[in-house]
């Protein structure tokens, strides 16, 4: 098994990435050294900076994950500001913003940044299209999971195995794992 340090403060992401990558011979170990999150307007720039910063600070190969929920009717909001908006508004108030809105389409995106010390980072992105539910449903997962619906069920209603077989994170991590095979 190859071990990769996953730099994040989010234990849910670590559990999901650990499950997903365990099927392809990779284990992840969390390091919560708190890399500075740039206030950029795209996930790629945030992941790029974080991966380079953490690889140089920890002096080992690392991965980071920057994710965001892009709601079509809100012009892509909260997108790269998803963490801040979740902490300040939360799911209930996002649903209020969507009151009476017929277009519920949304996309969840994940960008995995990987870097070795003194090298250029590599990025892998994955996304899943879904809808913003009418109300919060399900008690699994974390963050926006109770309001993001794919194929009739919210991520919060899915068991971990189901979410991890189709999520934005799964799709990004599979690209990463494929690339890593030859490195
Ligand atoms: P960040 O990638 O840590 O910046 O996360 C952005 C926001 O999206 C945070 O509020 C996370 O809790 C939330 N988030 C990230 N990934 C997921 C997911 O897979 N499901 C639900 N919420 C998520």
Image (cartoon, grey):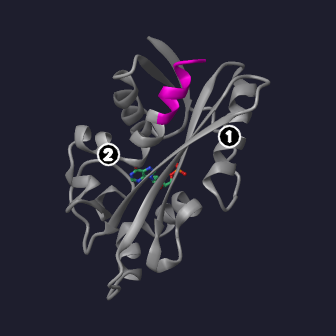
Residue at point 65% right, 35% down? 122
Q: Assess mark 1: CB under 8 A from ligand 1?
A: no
The residue carrying pointer 2 sits among few (fewer than 14), some (14 to 19) or many (20 or more) residues within 10 Å by Cα, namely some
Q: In terms of secondary structure, where does tag 1 sit?
A: helix
The C terminus lies in which quarter of the figure?
A: top right
- Along the viewing direction, whichever of 30 and 108 lies nearer the viewer: 108
- Image coordinates of residue 169 in percent, x first then y, are 43, 43
Cα–Cα gap, marks 2 and 1? 25 Å
- Image coordinates of residue 146 in percent, x first then y, are 29, 60
Residue at point 57% right, 32% down? 32
Seen in the picture, residue 37 relative to 18 is either above or below; the reply is: below
Seen in the picture, residue 74 relative to 54 is either above or below; the reply is: below
**Circle number at residue 153:** none
- Image coordinates of residue 11 in percent, x first then y, are 43, 36
Residue at point 52% right, 19% down? 181
- Image coordinates of residue 20 in percent, x first then y, are 36, 31
**Circle number at residue 50:** 1
The N terminus lies in which quarter of the figure?
A: top left
Q: In terms of secondary structure, where does tag 2 sit?
A: helix
Q: Quadrant of residue 31?
A: top right
In magenta segment, residue 83: no
Q: Is 116 displayed left or right of 106 in the figure?
A: right
Seen in the picture, residue 173 relative to 125 is either above or below; the reply is: above
Q: Is 21 displayed left or right of 125 in the figure?
A: left
Magenta span main SS: helix
Residues in magenta, as a range: 175-183
Going from N to C along the chain, the mark reached first, 2 or 1, is 1
The residue carrying pointer 1 sits among few (fewer than 14), some (14 to 19) or many (20 or more) residues within 10 Å by Cα, namely many
Q: Assess mark 2: CB under 8 A from ligand 1?
A: no
Q: Residue furthest right?
A: 118
Q: Which residue is mark 2?
A: 166
């Amino acid at each position: 098994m190859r071990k990769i340090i996953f730099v994040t403060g989010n234990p849910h992401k670590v559990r999901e990435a650990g499950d997903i990558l365990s099927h392809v011979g990779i284990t992840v170990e969390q390091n919560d050294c708190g890399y500075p999150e740039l206030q950029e307007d795209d996930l790629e720039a945030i992941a790029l900076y974080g991966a380079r910063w953490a690889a140089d600070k920890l002096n080992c190969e690392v991965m980071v994950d920057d994710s965001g929920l892009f709601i079509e009717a809100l012009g892509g909001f909260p997108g790269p500001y998803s963490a801040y908006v979740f902490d300040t508004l939360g799911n209930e108030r996002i649903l209020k913003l969507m009151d009476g809105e017929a277009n519920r389409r949304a996309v969840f995106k994940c960008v995995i940044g990987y870097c070795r010390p003194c090298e250029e980072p590599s990025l892998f992105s994955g996304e899943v299209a879904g809808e913003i539910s009418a109300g919060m449903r399900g008690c699994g997962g974390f963050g926006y999971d109770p309001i993001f619906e794919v194929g009739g069920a919210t991520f919060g209603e899915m068991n971990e195995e189901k979410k991890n077989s189709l999520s934005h994170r799964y799709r990004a991590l599979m690209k990463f794992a494929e690339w890593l095979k030859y490195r």
